[in-house]
Amino acid sequence: MAGQKKGIRTIVVDDSPAALRAISSVVARQQNLSFVGAASNGREALALARSLRPDLVLLDLEMPVMDGIEATSCLGRDCPEARVVIVTVHNTPELRKLCYRRGASGFIAKAALKDELPIVVLKLFGNGE
């Protein structure tokens, strides 16, 4: 189509290589998302986001060097245009509240990623038209 967007530029961050591959694969299958990079901890994610200026960061919580909570705060300060969506196995109301207070725009349980990612992206970015 003429004028079609390249997609929502997306970075995936997870310290588990298997999870990183799985999440990146889900991103690649979404028509409106464009996978632009991956990182294995919050510090790498911050450096990548500063250079690539993504629209969306899918971020795990438990990681070495800099965890997802701290990374969310830093991304909000350094890359305010990026929307941070937490993707984690830890899914409690208290944790969700903390993530939102730190600047997360969304929260998805890893087990529900395939089903919930399109819903969260639509909520955050609309249908792109």
Image (cartoon, grey):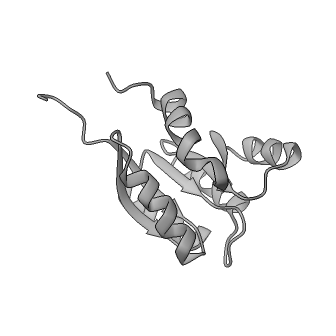
Instruction: Describe residue 8's horizontal placement relative to residue 23 as left or right.
Output: left
Instruction: Describe residue 15's horizontal placement relative to residue 62 as left or right.
Output: left
Let me know if residue 124 appears in the view. Answer: yes
Which residue reaches farthest right? 94
**Percent from the top left, x then y, of residue 40?**
55, 74
Instruction: Check the picture and name the quadrant holding the N terminus.
Output: top left
Up the image or down, 16 lies above or below 52; here it is below
Instruction: Indicate the quadrant where residue 51 lies.
Output: bottom left
Residue at screen point 81% across, 47% down = 98
Residue at screen point 54% across, 54% down = 58
Instruction: Indicate the quadrant where residue 59 lies.
Output: bottom right
Instruction: Describe residue 107's horizontal placement relative to residue 114 as left or right.
Output: right
Name the one closer to the observer, 50 or 7: 7
Up the image or down, 30 lies above or below 18; here it is above
**Percent from the top left, x then y, of residue 122?**
48, 29
**Percent from the top left, x then y, of residue 18?**
54, 74
Let me know if residue 47 appears in the view. Answer: no
Tally of marks: 0
**Percent from the top left, x then y, of residue 43?**
58, 71
Name the one closer to the observer, 14 or 55: 14
Which residue reaches farthest left? 2
Residue at screen point 51% across, 52% down = 57
Instruction: Indicate the quadrant where residue 69 lies.
Output: bottom right
Instruction: Check the picture and name the quadrant holding the C terminus.
Output: top left
